Image (tube, coloured by chain):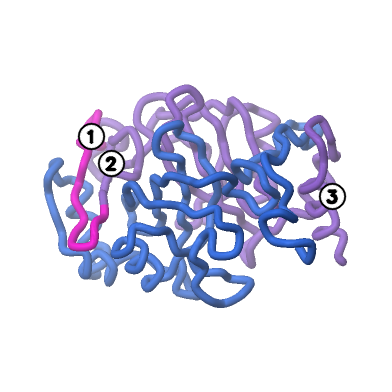
Chain colours: A purple, B blue
């Protein structure tokens, strides 16, 4: 068994309170072929799932150090400090890793709108077997967040 | 602008109640190079984020048709009807798509433990700048769910 599998197999059976050094976990997590991992942002108090974005090792380390959420922007190919353009920052309350070390859950305090459309969260299209339907409206006009060029 | 971009750009500015046929959305969503999309499962009433797994078009269509959540298993390379081995099924309450059509949020009713470790959810390792710490215990022994071969 590889060290990576071994690390997460041990945690599976571990009791609450069991600890591993962060560096070992970072080494053994499953980053994809671009060095990225999905990170789900959830509003810590209301439980709303706000968005899903991607992190690399450096952006996760920065987030844990600073307490301000930093993703990796796949479209811009650079670190994306959430809110750097829009002002709609995410403060980290708690970061959690899943059982097989390939997905992050970030409990955050989201200022304003998490979605670039100006909506509180990104999941505003409900799907049924026949159709998709928009179910929420923007809180703010995205032009006020990003300027008219958006 | 491609039809796919056009579809989601139109929905960005759309008012609540705006609809698109499911087939058009399925055609225009961003499936990755393996034809998959991340799907986040959230317990519909408590708001707990239970797990993240992957769906292809067929598994999403099946889930919307049957109301029972079906993922695509990357390790087994076949449809994975959640609970088929363990009995811990997920009933779909509502499916939602995100703003750029590349992530799903599934509001579900989870029977028992969502995680293969026997825990309620998969996100049981809290990360800080120094370490990871296990913060929850199994509800059930995974051997009772999957047998001693697990």
Residue for badge 3: A10
Distance CA(mark 1)–CA(mark 3) = 45 Å
Q: Is residue A127 left or right of residue A111?
A: left
Label 2 lies in what chain?
A
Question: What is the magenta range?
Answer: A127-142
Q: Is residue B92 left or right of residue A94?
A: left
> Where residue A3 appears, x then y in whole percent?
87, 59
Residue for badge 1: A138
Is residue A146 one of those drawn in magenta? no
Q: Residue at x 57, y 48 (%)?
A: B114
Which of A91 and B41 lies nearest the eye of the viewer?
Answer: B41
Residue for badge 2: A117
Residues marked 1 and 2 touching at CB (< 8 Å)? yes
Label 1 lies in what chain?
A
Q: Residue at x 86, y 65 (%)?
A: A2
Mark 2 vs 3, N-terminal side: 3
Q: Residue at x 64, y 67 (%)?
A: A33
């Amino acid at each position: 068994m590889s060290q990576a599998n071994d690390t997460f197999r041990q945690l599976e059976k571990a009791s609450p309170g069991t600890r591993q050094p962060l560096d070992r976990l970072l080494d053994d997590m499953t980053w994809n072929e671009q060095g990225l991992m999905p990170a789900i942002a959830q509003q810590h108090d209301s439980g709303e799932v706000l968005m899903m974005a991607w992190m690399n090792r450096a952006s996760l380390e920065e987030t844990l150090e600073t307490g301000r959420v930093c993703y990796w922007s796949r479209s811009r190919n650079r670190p994306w400090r959430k809110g750097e353009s829009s002002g709609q920052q995410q403060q980290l309350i708690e970061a959690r890793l899943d059982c097989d070390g390939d997905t992050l859950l970030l409990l955050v305090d989201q200022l304003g709108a998490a979605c670039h459309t100006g909506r509180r969260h990104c999941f505003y299209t409900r799907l049924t077997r026949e159709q998709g339907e928009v179910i929420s409206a923007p809180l703010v006009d995205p032009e006020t967040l990003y300027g008219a060029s958006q």
